[in-house]
Amino acid sequence: MLVKELPSYKYKYYVPNNDEATNYEYQYPGHLIEITISNTSDKSVSFPIDTASYAMPFTDNIELYYNSKPNIISKGDRYNVLGAYAFIYQKGIFKDFDAGTDPFYEEEQLIEIQKIENTRLQKINEWKDAKKITDELFATYNWYMMTHMVTILPHDKITYKLYFNPFLKKMSEYSDRLYYDQLDSKVPYNVTFRLILNKNLYQFLTLEDKKKYPDLFIGTISSNSLIFK
């Protein structure tokens, strides 16, 4: 995986369209990142990937991801957990993420939030019924993974861009407010992106899914490191 920062004048289009993200952009300017994943082998590979944004890690021990229920975010799609995880180290110390408290919402906004969640749940429930899945968590991840599956042909690649701002990740007006805990904006930090596609994640695929994608990539794909000052 190759990552590079693109010129800042190009990223305004990628800044999430909500007041809080825009306000943070003035105080803590973000970065436009281009990610390229290449298949250098002679065989095709398939895996799920969320290119809408990046994921935020809770530990730098890769083996712990998806290995038990406490280490599985129930609404993984809302946290973009199929995206490339941005691992940040500052002064050699790993930085995990935290979530800010929700702002005060008016009644109409609360109604809109519920509508958005109802639409999401309807999609998951329809998927769950169609595939005859009984477990809610399994259904959520199966839907999320299968609707984000890609296949890279031999010696081919995929490239996408994303907006990266470790001081606030807020994808929409009603999204969760996520940030890297105790990250000092005045001190340089290193960022390495990793796609975590371990066996634990694939527990959420059915036998039929695995037959459909017999070339599943299992492992971790790591990028080069970027230094932001």
Image (cartoon, rainbow, N blue to C red):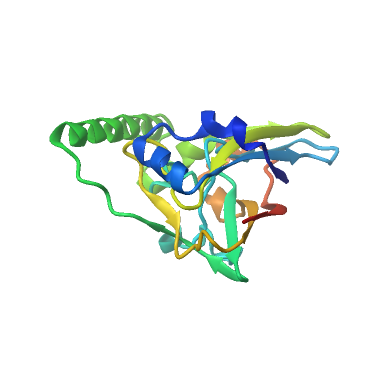
Where residue 102 appears, x then y in whole percent? 27, 49
As drawn, 103 above or below 131? below
| Front position in the image: 64 or 125 | 64
In the rendered image, the residue lying farthest to the right is 42
Outermost residue to the bottom:
92
Residue 184: percent from left, percent from top: 50, 63
Residue 2 point in image, percent of width and height: 74, 45
Question: From this viewpoint, which residue is outermost toward the left?
Answer: 107
Of residues 155 and 4, the one nearer the viewer is: 4
Q: Is residue 128 left or right of residue 190?
A: left
| Quadrant in which the C terminus appears | bottom right
Look at 30% across and 31% down and name the residue there.
116
Figure label count? 0
Res 60 seen here: yes
Q: Residue 209: name its quadrant.
A: top right
Residue drawn where x is 48% and y is 49% of the image: 28
Residue at 53%, 28% in the rendered image: 13
The x and y percentages for residue 173 are: 33, 36
Q: Is residue 221 above or below residue 13?
A: below
Q: Nearer the viewer, residue 159 or 126?
A: 159
Q: Is residue 200 above or below residue 205?
A: below
Q: Is residue 105 left or right of residue 85?
A: left
Residue depicted at x 60% and y 64%: 89
User: Can residue 73 be seen here?
Assistant: no
- Judged left or right of residue 204, residue 140 is left
